[in-house]
Amino acid sequence: MATEVDICNLALAHLGDDATIATLSPPEGSAQAQNASRFYPIARDTLLDMHAWDFATKRGNLASSTNTNNQWEYAYIAPSDMMSAVAVISPSAQNDYATRMSAGDTPGGITSNYAPTISAGQYTPQQFVLEIDNSGNQLIYSNQKNAMLRYQAYVNDTTKFSSLFTMTLSWHLASMLAGPVIKGDQGTAEAKRCTSMMQGYMQQAKKSDNAHRQISVEHIVPWTSGR
């Protein structure tokens, strides 16, 4: 599997730069290494945030917190490695990927702040919100008792990345490096070219990633969800 250094060198190769980086932490003395060390974490995290990648999906029980928000019944502490919350889950949920669907929705377009609970044999959406308390802690408010959370986590380990994600990341990073490596209008044009290549690989990566889920999404309209 590709390492962080491999991904950075691949990004430089996309730009036609013959330099080879040996280390990123700490970065070696070259300008390429300095720029790659600065932009790689940004490229990685923004790409992780663009899709619910299966290798970054986690779930677990939420720890309770003091609830001072009278609009919600329960408050929970957000996981420290959470990038984004996907679904608050009932402990009895059999298929927490099911959700309420509205006109124009597709199974891949699951609303991020709804999660199913079981009611009379059907799934009904469970709302939640993320807020910061007065101490700066990120909390998840919900009416779900003993809630579990499905969420996207920060992933630093490149061995977890799929091959298509790695290629997409290398082009995403190249688009960020184009300006510092290639100055002027040529650098701007290269950044656009790399972004276009990233978007092409992104489509393939998302399609491959979605194929890893064999989930039948249950369509429930709002006026029948409570039956």
Image (cartoon, rainbow, N blue to C red):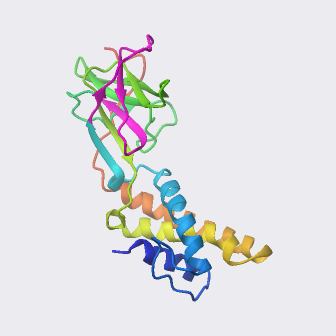
Q: Nearer the viewer, residue 146 or 213?
A: 146
Determine if the magenta segment contains residue 78.
Answer: yes
Furthest-top residue in this view:
70
The range drawn in magenta is 61-89
Against 123, residue 152 (above or below) is below
Q: Tell me: 107 left or right of 42.
A: left
Picture coordinates of residue 53 (x, y %)? Answer: 39, 53
Picture coordinates of residue 215 (x, y %)? Answer: 29, 44
Q: Residue at x 44, y 31 (%)?
A: 137
Q: Residue at x 43, y 65 (%)?
A: 165
To which quarter of the image does residue 18 belong? bottom right
Q: Tell me: 98 left or right of 201.
A: left
Picture coordinates of residue 112 (x, y %)? Answer: 44, 36
Against 52, residue 64 (above or below) is above
Q: Residue at x 37, y 57 (%)?
A: 209
Determine if the magenta segment contains residue 9.
Answer: no
The image quadrant where one finds the C terminus is top left
In this rendering, the count of numbered labels is 0
Picture coordinates of residue 26 (x, y %)? Answer: 47, 72
To which quarter of the image does residue 59 belong? top left
The image quadrant where one finds the N terminus is bottom left
Q: Nearer the viewer, residue 32 or 193?
A: 32
Furthest-bottom residue in this view:
18
